[in-house]
Image (cartoon, rainbow, N blue to C red):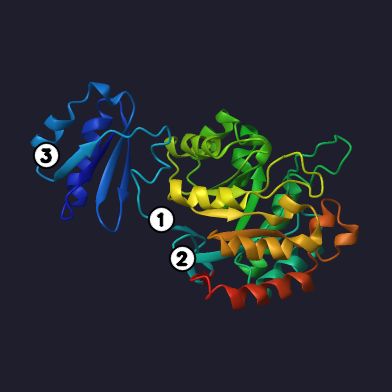
Amino acid sequence: MVFILERDVTDAQVDVFRKEFERQGFSTIYAPGTEHKAVCLLGNTSVIDMDQVVESHSYVSYGRRVTEQYKAAGRTVHPDDTVITVGSGENAVQIGGGTFTVISGPCSVETEAQICLVAESVKAAGAKILRGGAFKPRTSPYSFQGLGTDGLALLKTAKALTGLPLISEIMNQTQLSLFEDVDIVQIGARNMQNFDLLKAVGRMGKPVLLKRGLCNTLDELLMSAEYVMNSGCGSVILCERGIRTFETATRNTLDLAGVCVLKEKTHLPVLVDPSHAAGIRSLVAPLAKAALAVGADGVMIESHNDPANALCDGAQSLDLLQFSALMDELRVRVPIEGKRLQ
């Protein structure tokens, strides 16, 4: 159920209105849009007399019941695009709201020299957020699993050197305390429906990037986002990283049509990961440009100083010169698509 409030409603009135329902056991979501302000109630709203609520609160314009399963993530409650700010000061980055944000870095942190070199290079090329895996979910138990806590420490060193905000993947609830210095917590494709983890991460108070599962529908992705948001996190970023189909020419099949559908259904920012989608270095740049063309809010690109000798996913990683060249191409195309490179 959502209540649309009058434009001149005060913050104090909104606070009183929300607490009135929270005392009854409902969760509330406040959506201050450009056209109107709204409060959404989560719970068994069948017991609420909607007309009585409107009549007894002068600052409530009207109410309506939300039929979509995803109440917090859908545009019915929150019609305006959500803009998420990551980092602070001169390194603050906006995701969504007409920006095109580029995240880059190695699939896995390997050494201090490697992550610092890559961080400085991608920043110079124009990337605004540094990615790097410390804990790696690998199909084979014999593959490199990441440096763990040492990898997070090296990411922190790279952040101190460059100022770039960090994004890294969390694997389970036991790692929550380790991500204090990580600016965006990533939920990988294999954990998209790990609901206990989604709820725990939602309570962390940090932006969350949620990747679509290999065989999951868009509605399932949105319902997973709902778990995170229902736990208190309004800053969720969705990521299309390719899905498993019958096609074997690429590692996965990048669902660009799905990006368009998500932009219609949800106010949350939508990014594309062409590296994992293709698994082939030569396809990363054209797919990144395609993501921009269909309206994505940014891309996450794997880059490495020596892809041929990378410990993880070297075949899909751009070298630093290739990444810089891609950034030059995006810089030309972004204004044409009505975006700002961020």
Question: Residue at horizontal 58%, vertical 55%?
Answer: 271
Is any atom of residue 181 visible in this view? no
| First-in-chain label (1 vs 3) | 3
21 over 296 or under it: above or below: above
Question: Residue at horizontal 69%, vertical 69%?
Answer: 122
The CA distance from mark 1 to mark 3 is 27 Å
Element marked by disc 2: loop
Is any atom of residue 88 visible in this view? yes
* Label disc, if present, on residue 81 of the rendered structure: 1
Question: Residue at horizontal 69%, vertical 56%?
Answer: 274
Nearest to the observer: residue 74 or residue 319: 74
Q: Quadrant of residue 61?
A: top left
| First-in-chain label (1 vs 2) | 1
Nearest to the observer: residue 128 or residue 97: 97
Outermost top residue: 47
Amino acid carrying label 1: it is Asp
Q: Can you give x and y, in whole percent of width and height, for residue 89 in the image? A: 48, 69
Amino acid carrying label 2: it is Gly
Q: Can you give x and y, in whole percent of width and height, for residue 28 in the image? A: 32, 36
Q: Can you give x and y, in whole percent of width and height, for residue 340 in the image? A: 51, 72
Q: Neighbour class for label 1 at 10 Å: few (<14), some, many (≥20)? A: some
In the picture, measured across the screen, residue 13 lies left or right of residue 264, that is: left
* Label disc, if present, on residue 98 of the rendered structure: 2
Of tags 1 and 3, which is closer to the observer?
Answer: 1
The quadrant of the rendering that contains the N terminus is top left
Q: Quadrant of residue 328?
A: bottom right
Which residue is under mark 3? 57
Q: Neighbour class for label 2 at 10 Å: few (<14), some, many (≥20)? A: many
Circles 1 and 2: CB distance less than 8 Å? yes
* Label disc, if present, on residue 126 of the rendered structure: none
